[in-house]
């Protein structure tokens, strides 16, 4: 009997999909959503254990993915609709969680204890007429002080901090975090730019013909034979000028400026 029901359900869904492709009727689409709602429930049940969002919200988001699958399904390709729809439902939920959830994943135990700590802190504050200490909170939660510190740190760092956030105020204005955090890639780029400027300044001091040889070999990537033909000199002369020019550049760039 269940096999017959399943076959009849699949047949009904297929008929409605054909009708929807022809009419684009919202009524038919809603019927398809209703018949395939079990796919959404299955995905929502899975993700409810992976996040802090409500089951109802996940159902609504999953239905958006189901509708998208209905609109894009092509009967002619011969795919089973359920296999086609699940990635759309799952993808819509994952996209929703990425946009709304915290960027840094926090263990569910930590999240539960953090939520519990809010009520515990309120009770202790009423009891002692002051803000409870970390040790008192940890004891009330029946965890170690070290674990409570880890939970606090995880909660504070649950989202990335913008590099534009001001971290210092003074008479000269605020300083952003980005200005205080070294960027190794930018530093390498900066050094390369500085070296290029120094190289250009050193090349100006090199004798004209030697500078031409160096530029043809290292900047234009010509072979020494091609440079010789270009300048009308021998390959041996090119080789000597390359060696002489490199030695001079090392001296100019490495030594102190006069």
Image (cartoon, grey):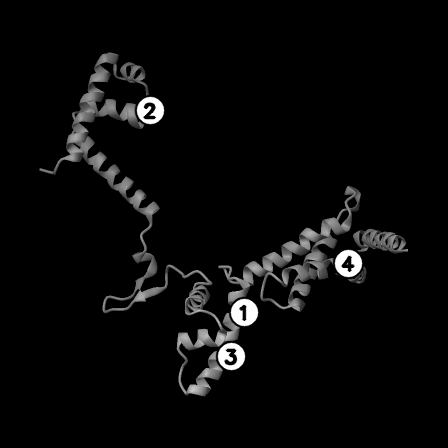
The residue singled out by tag 1 in the image is 112
Residue at mark 1 to residue at mark 3: CA–CA distance: 12 Å
Q: Residue visible at 49% across and 77% down?
A: 118
> Is label 3 in a helix, a strand or a loop?
helix
Q: Is residue 62 left or right of residue 226?
A: right
- Assign a secondary structure to mark 1: helix
Q: Which mark is residue 221?
A: 2
Q: Pointer 4 and pointer 2: residues touching (CB < 8 Å)?
A: no
> Which of the two labelled residues, at mark 3 and mark 4, occupies the earlier sequence position?
4
Mark 3 is surrounded, within 10 Å at the Cα level, by few (under 14), some (14 to 19) or many (20 or more) other residues, namely few
Residue beneath disc 3: 119
Q: Residue at x 65, y 64 (%)?
A: 58
Residue 141 percent across, percent down from the top left: 49, 74
Q: Could you tell whether 228 is left or right of 69 in the image?
A: left
Task: Decide: is 245 above or below 14.
Answer: above
State the separation of the CA atoms marked 1 and 4: 33 Å
């Amino acid at each position: 009997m269940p096999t017959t029901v399943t076959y009849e359900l699949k047949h009904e869904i297929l008929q409605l999909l054909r009708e929807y492709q022809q009419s684009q009727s919202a009524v038919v689409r809603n019927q398809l959503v209703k018949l395939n709602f079990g796919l959404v429930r299955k995905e929502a049940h899975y993700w409810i254990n992976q996040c802090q969002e409500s089951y109802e919200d996940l159902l609504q988001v999953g239905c958006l993915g189901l509708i998208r699958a209905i609109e894009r399904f092509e009967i002619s390709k011969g795919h089973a609709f359920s296999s086609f729809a699940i990635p759309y439902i799952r993808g819509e939920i994952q996209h929703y969680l990425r946009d709304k959830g915290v960027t840094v994943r926090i263990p569910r135990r930590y999240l539960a204890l953090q939520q519990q700590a809010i009520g515990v802190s309120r009770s202790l504050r009423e009891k002692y007429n002051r803000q409870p200490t970390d040790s008192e909170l940890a004891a009330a939660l029946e965890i170690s002080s070290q674990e409570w510190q880890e939970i606090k740190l995880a909660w504070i760092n649950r989202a990335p901090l913008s590099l534009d956030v001001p971290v210092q105020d003074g008479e000269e204005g605020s300083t952003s975090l980005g200005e205080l955090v070294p960027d190794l890639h930018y530093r390498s780029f900066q050094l390369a730019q500085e070296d290029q400027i120094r190289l250009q300044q050193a090349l100006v001091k090199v004798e004209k013909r030697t500078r031409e040889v160096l530029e043809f070999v290292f900047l234009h990537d010509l072979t020494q034979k091609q440079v010789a033909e270009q300048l009308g000199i021998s390959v041996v002369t090119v080789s000597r000028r390359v060696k002489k020019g490199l030695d001079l550049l090392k001296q100019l760039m490495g030594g102190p400026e006069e």
